[in-house]
Amino acid sequence: MDFRHLEAFVAVVDEGSFSNAASRLQISQSMVTVYVRNLESELGVKLLNRTTRSMELSPDGQTYYYYARQILKLNRDSMFALSRADSGERTVNIVATPYTSRYYLSGKIAEFERAHPDVGFQITVCYNSEIAPKLRAGGFQFAFSNTKIMDSEYAVHKYSSAGLVIITPNVERFRALRGRPFPNELFGTERLITRSSNSALQQEFLRWVKRQLPDVKLQIAAAIDDTETIKQLVADGIGIAVLSEVAVQEMVRDGRLLSFPLEGIMRQQLYFVSKKKHLSPVQEEFRAFILDGAERKE
C-alpha cells in the first residue's frame, strides 16, 4: 500500500474537497484524484461518492477513513521512534507529562547537564494516558508520570509526592485565614478556576468535593487546562483554585498568591519509569542520578 494514497484520501475528507487537499499536500489536484482512485482500485470499494456539486463518504469510506487515520498515525509514530532509537548513545530520550516536565524534570536536566555538557536530551510532553503507548512504540528510555506505568520492559520507581493546596489572591480577606484550615463553605461562595480536562488532579479534587462537600454547588469562574494561566488568574483576583503545592510554591514565596492545605486528600504521586535493559553508559548515569534524588526525597 502506498502511504501517499492514504494521505490523499484522508486529506480530501479532512479538507472537504480535492482542491483543498491538493493545497494541503502541495501537489496538483489531478494527482490527488489519481491517488484516491488508485486506493479505491486497490481496495475494490468506492470510498467517496462524487458529483459535480458535492462529495461525501460512502459507507465503506466512513469505515475506512477511521482506519486510514490510524495507519498514518502509526507510520508517523514508528518513524519517530526509529529516529529516536538512532539518536546516539549520548542522547537521553524522555517522555513526560506537562506537570512533571515543568516542575520536576527541567531542573534535574539542568543539574545533570552541568556535569555532562556533551549529553543531549530529547523530551516529548504528553498526557498521562499517552505515555504507556509511546513507551511501547519504542525509542524512549525514561518517563516521568503522575500515574503508575505497567510494562514488563520498564521499572517503575516512586520519585516524589506533593499535596494539593487551595490558592487565593493575596488580599486581606484571605490573609485573615492564615494559620487555620481553609473554610469549606467558601467553596460554595468563592468563584473557582478549574481544569477543563479530566486530569488526575482534577479527578482527585472532584472525589474530595463529593466526600467533603456533598451539598455544595461549586461556582465555576473558568475552566482552563494550563496551570500557569490558572495561577495568574487567581493572582489577578478572578477566583480561587486547587493545584499541586509544587506548582505554586514560587508565586507563594514571591507573595503573589496565598496557599492553604487541602485537608483529607491523598498526596499526588510522581513516578520515574526507566528501561530495564539496553541503556548506554550515559543513560545508566542519568538513571542513577534521578534515583539518587528520589532516595533523598523519601
Image (cartoon, helix red, strand yellow):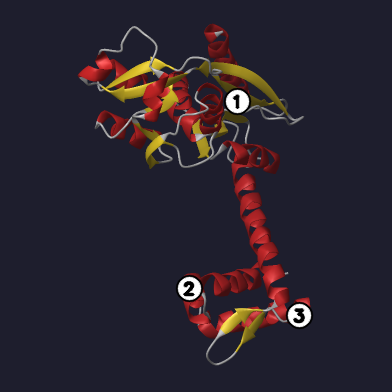
Image quarter in which the N terminus is found: bottom right
* Mark 3 secondary-structure assignment: loop
- Residue 26 shows which numbered tag? 2
Residue 185 location (% of width, % of height) = 40, 22
- Residue 45 shows which numbered tag? 3
**Sequence-wise first label, 2 or 1:** 2
User: In front: mark 1 or mark 3?
Assistant: 3
Considering only vertical position in the picture, is 69 above or below 256?
below
What amino acid is labelled 1 in the image?
Answer: Gln
What amino acid is labelled 3 in the image?
Answer: Val
Q: Is residue 138 left or right of residue 28?
A: right
Image quarter in which the C terminus is found: top right
Considering only vertical position in the picture, is 46 above or below 118?
below
* Mark 1 secondary-structure assignment: helix
Furthest residue in direction bottom, as rendered: 52
Residue 192 location (% of width, % of height) = 37, 33
* Mark 2 secondary-structure assignment: loop
Q: Which residue is mark 1?
A: 283
Q: Label 2 crowding class (10 Å Cα cut-off): few <14, some 14-19, many 20+?
A: few
Q: Can the viewer see residue 254?
A: no
Q: Is residue 202 left or right of residue 63?
A: left
